[in-house]
Image (tube, coloured by chain):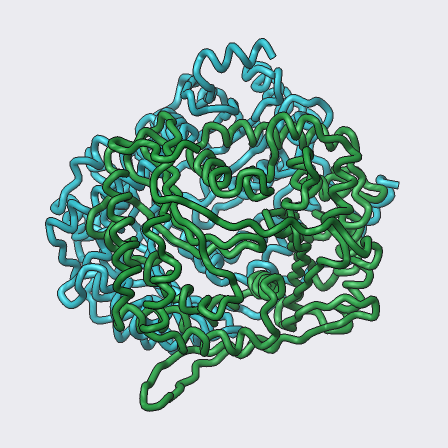
């Protein structure tokens, strides 16, 4: 059952109201040695299951960029004794849904299965994870789709900005290039490369599992063993950490389009740093979204320079970033860049106001329980918590950590994290009055 | 072995009927004395509520010459009332741990907040306030107009596919305002002013033109009491005009468009046909078209996928699409993204051939059974997300449908037969009702394509 309730807390005379997430998370360990986090919710007859493999596309072997992405796309394109169409037909016949997705740090499978045919659905899921076929015709079909996407990205302003940003920050590290690969690297991938990518990525030593919905602990334990027991014990070594080094300035990528797209930022903070929560609250005030943030207020509400501007802590497994994004007409992007820089300097030197801190904390603590409102979302949050190495009780202590952040904490962390002297912008478009300040 | 597996799964559909009908009823409806409709969707798993007000007015209800005013007004609704300062609405929602936003379409404008259930009273108080007490400062209007122009830049000007969609839509509708973009034509957006917004607000924002939808951990009676308290005192607008949009004349000429933009790396051919929508009490035709689009282009097992991607490598992607929820005539679409070395002309010919063969060969009964089973299952999965359920009701009720229509829709879909689908296909694919578009890169890029 999902139990959440509003709770009034009185702390040393200071009253604050926050809904508190009291979610009953069970830790389930299977005979085969797998562990999962489970929220049982029997009221709707289906289960959401998340299976995550740490490492993701960053485990691509040298010269094989794109192999893991292509392998992931092919998991649903034939396995066991079924070719691609037979597998999809069978999945549709059960009204099950399996999504296979890979990012820099994680390969995640999100499954949704009806209670009434869960065993049959699980058998399909298992064969896609354990016995993918990588048929020649499926490889060519998916290769053509991926290359088509890569070509489209080459003329899409957002994709160009992302690629230039990653290259600027990370160079030869796996984070430095698109996980799709290049047209050349994808064209060269062989079936052997895909088999190797499968072994490197999906192994028992890096799997994290969560479920929410109509399933008991015992049933989940049996399900995990049947799904995952035949995976290899170990996979490829994780990539190395990389330090983020930036300089103040602008990299312009000329591209003929009416609106310039910008990514900006510099180094960030580790998820387990003692000041992480202070940084998290600071980012809420600076630009985490909503119409009240400093960035949104100054750049959009007061000046109408953009439709949306956001900042976020990107604490990846091997690098920590603090970054943001904005888009403004070519003639106006320079002003947006100026305003962003001014906000950075202001908050770094002066911190934030008590009023801003109070409302950010109310928003963050009040909004937290609202996230847990569906089986799929709950399973996603639970697997994310495991990937971030947060404890089982995190949902019940998280709001207290937010509430404990003081004005002094925010001021300290702002001075530490916000670095106007390292704030770099990558801008794609024809920005008026801006030129590249850095050779690379 | 594959065939055996198919047989096994197909037979199981009959053996295990889904029991979606037995799920407890979640939806309760009321109408306030002033004509405001109320829909309550219960989900007691978490103490959360989504509060939405939908107005039966969208961009297609705009006077000519002020395109984009419905959407602009939606932005300006956050700019204050007699009692709320500009921005204070969202600030108050956030200070209560909630999130809020709004959306505009051809047929509706909606406002919503997602909050802890005990904040519902406050949300209703604020939403009722801005239904009648909007106050706009000229400087806020001017700044926000820059924001919507940047929104147009982000959504349309920076994306050749979106520019192309505007041109195709304008060609598909000769007279009906669905041919005008929701966000507006740029040259008209630049001229929108405070008075345009206030005129539109005065004409359309009233309780008898609105639907309140509350979804989440709520009791219907309690929602009704709150609705009566906050929305009940607002008088109905007596002179509310019926929604009569200009209708389409007979379409006599097939239209063909080519749009070139150097930012296009992957060309495609796309065609839209004028198509009937779901009508109250008469959803059968739309149901047949929904099934047709699924069978023809609904994914890896579809006819298009089989003929264009598996049997021959004509396409890297192909699809058919149709959405029946619309106040007036909607469209049925086909798209093919050609494989390397395949021209758009070849792709179009293969697309036409696939459609003709489908009509000739008829419907695969197992494919139809699979789609129907998935529709049943989606009623179960749908219960997990009341916000999308709320959106489904809002979209339907602002498109002329009733709660009964929404609740009957799954059964209407289940009743669709092969005959219905083939008849619908023969009627819909009428070239004089269609717009065929080629999206292409700059000339030089295309030349390079041909030589590859």
Q: Position of residue B401 (x, y in %)?
A: 42, 51
Can you tell which quarter of the image residue B163 is in? top left
The image shows residue A216, relative to residue B172, as above or below, that is below
Front residue of A81 and A86: A81
Q: In what quadrant of the picture does the C terminus of chain A appear?
A: top left
Identify the image quadrant of the N terminus of chain A: bottom right
Residue A104 at what x, y percent from top left? 59, 47
Q: Is residue B103 left or right of residue B134?
A: right
How many marks the image carries: the answer is 0
Question: Where residue B288 sits: x, y (%)?
Answer: 57, 40
Residue A88, can we see it? Answer: no
Q: Nearer the viewer, residue B217 or A307?
A: A307
Q: Looking at the picture, how far across and down is residue A216, in whole percent?
A: 72, 73
Name which residue lies at 57% across and 53% down: A318
For image coordinates 15% across by 47% down, the residue present is: B199
Q: Residue at x 42, y 64 (%)?
A: A280
Residue B383 image-quadrant placement: bottom right
Q: Is residue A113 above or below residue A129?
A: below
Q: Is residue B96 left or right of residue B361?
A: left
Judge whether residue B104 can be spotted in this image.
yes
The chain drawn cyan is chain what? B
Q: Residue at x 63, y 25 (%)?
A: A184
Look at chain A in the picture and name its colour.
Answer: green
Depth check, front residue: A421 or B265? A421
In this rendered view, identify the residue nearer to me: B297 or A88. A88
| Left or right position of A191 against A437 | right
């Amino acid at each position: 059952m999902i139990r959440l309730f509003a709770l009034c807390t009185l702390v040393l005379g200071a009253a604050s109201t926050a809904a508190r997430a009291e979610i009953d998370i069970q830790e389930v360990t299977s005979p085969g040695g797998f562990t999962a986090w489970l929220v049982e919710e029997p009221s709707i007859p289906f289960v959401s299951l998340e299976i995550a493999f740490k490492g993701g596309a960053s485990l691509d072997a040298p010269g094989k960029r794109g192999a893991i992405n292509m392998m992931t796309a092919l998991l649903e394109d034939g396995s066991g004794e079924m070719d691609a169409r037979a597998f999809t037909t069978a999945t549709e016949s059960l009204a099950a849904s399996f999504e296979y997705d890979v990012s820099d740090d994680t390969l995640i499978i999100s499954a949704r299965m009806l209670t009434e045919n869960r065993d049959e659905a699980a058998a399909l899921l298992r064969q896609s994870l354990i016995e993918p076929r990588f048929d020649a015709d499926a490889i060519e079909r998916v290769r053509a789709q991926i290359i088509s996407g890569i070509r489209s990205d080459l003329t899409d302003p957002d994709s160009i900005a992302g690629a230039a940003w990653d290259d600027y920050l990370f160079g030869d590290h796996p984070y430095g290039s698109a996980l799709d690969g290049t047209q050349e690297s994808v064209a060269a991938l062989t079936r052997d490369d895909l088999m190797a990518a499968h072994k490197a990525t999906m192994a028992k030593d890096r799997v994290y599992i969560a479920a929410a919905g109509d399933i008991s602990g015992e049933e989940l334990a049996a399900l995990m063993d049947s799904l995952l027991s035949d995976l290899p014990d170990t996979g490829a070594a994780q990539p190395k950490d990389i330090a983020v080094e930036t300089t103040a300035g602008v990299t312009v990528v000329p591209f003929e389009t009416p609106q310039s797209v910008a990514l900006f930022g510099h180094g960030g903070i580790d998820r387990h740093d003692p000041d992480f929560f202070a940084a998290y609250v600071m980012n809420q005030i600076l630009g985490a979204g909503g119409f009240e943030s400093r960035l949104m207020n100054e750049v959009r509400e007061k000046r109408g320079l953009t439709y949306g501007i956001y900042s976020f802590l990107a604490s990846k497994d091997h690098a920590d970033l603090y970054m943001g994004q904005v888009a403004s007409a070519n003639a106006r992007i320079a002003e947006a860049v100026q305003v962003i820089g001014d906000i950075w300097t202001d908050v770094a030197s002066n911190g934030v106001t008590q009023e801003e801190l109070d409302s950010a904390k109310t928003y963050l603590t009040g909004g937290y329980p609202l996230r847990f409102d569906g089986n799929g979302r709950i399973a996603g949050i639970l697997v994310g918590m495991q990937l971030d190495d947060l404890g089982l009780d995190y949902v019940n202590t998280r709001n207290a950590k937010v509430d404990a952040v003081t004005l002094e904490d925010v001021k300290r962390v702002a001075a530490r994290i916000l670095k106007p002297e390292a704030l770099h912008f990558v801008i794609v478009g024809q920005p008026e009055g801006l030129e590249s300040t850095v050779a690379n | 072995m594959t065939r055996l597996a198919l047989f096994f799964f197909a037979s199981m559909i009959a053996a295990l009927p889904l029991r979606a009908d037995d799920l407890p009823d979640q939806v309760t409806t009321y109408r306030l004395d002033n004509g405001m409709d109320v829909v309550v969707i219960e989900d007691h798993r978490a103490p959360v509520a989504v509060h939405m007000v939908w107005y039966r007015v969208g961009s297609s209800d705009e006077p000519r010459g002020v395109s984009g005013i419905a959407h602009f007004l939606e932005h300006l609704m956050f700019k204050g009332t007699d009692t709320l300062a500009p921005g204070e609405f969202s600030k108050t929602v956030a200070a209560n741990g909630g999130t809020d936003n709004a959306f505009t379409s051809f047929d509706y404008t909606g406002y919503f907040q997602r909050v802890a259930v005990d904040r519902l009273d406050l949300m209703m108080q604020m939403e009722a306030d801005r239904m009648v007490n909007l106050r706009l400062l000229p400087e806020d209007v001017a700044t926000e107009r820059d924001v919507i122009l940047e929104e147009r830049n982000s959504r349309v000007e920076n994306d050749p596919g979106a520019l192309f969609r505007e041109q195709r839509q304008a060609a598909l509708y000769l007279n009906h305002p669905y041919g005008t973009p929701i966000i507006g034509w740029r040259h008209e957006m630049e001229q929108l002013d405070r008075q345009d917004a206030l005129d539109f607000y005065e004409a359309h924002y009233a309780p008898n033109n609105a639907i309140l939808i509350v979804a989440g951990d709520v009791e219907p009676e309690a929602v009704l009491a709150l609705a009566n308290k906050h929305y009940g005192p607002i008088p109905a607008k007596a002179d509310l005009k019926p929604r009569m949009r200009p209708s389409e004349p007979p379409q006599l000429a097939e239209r063909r468009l080519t749009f070139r933009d150097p930012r296009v790396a992957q060309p495609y051919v796309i065609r839209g046909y004028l198509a009937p929508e779901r009508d109250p009490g008469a959803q059968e035709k739309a149901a047949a078209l929904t099934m047709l689009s699924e069978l023809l282009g609904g994914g890896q097992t579809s006819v298009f996928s089989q003929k264009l991607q598996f049997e021959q490598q004509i396409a890297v992607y192909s699809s058919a699409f149709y959405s029946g929820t619309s106040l007036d005539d909607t469209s049925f679409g086909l798209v093919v993204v050609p494989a390397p070395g395949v021209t758009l002309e070849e792709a179009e010919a293969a697309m036409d051939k696939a459609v003709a063969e489908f009509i000739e060969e008829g419907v695969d009964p197992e494919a139809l059974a699979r789609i129907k089973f998935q529709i049943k299952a989606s009623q179960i999965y749908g219960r997990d997300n009341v916000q999308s359920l709320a959106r489904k009701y809002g979209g339907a009720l602002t498109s002329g449908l009733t709660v009964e229509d929404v609740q009957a829709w799954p059964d209407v879909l289940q009743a669709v037969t092969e005959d219905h689908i083939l008849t619908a296909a023969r009627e819909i694919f009428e070239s004089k009702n269609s717009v065929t578009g080629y999206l292409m890169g700059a000339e030089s890029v295309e030349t390079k394509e041909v030589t590859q």
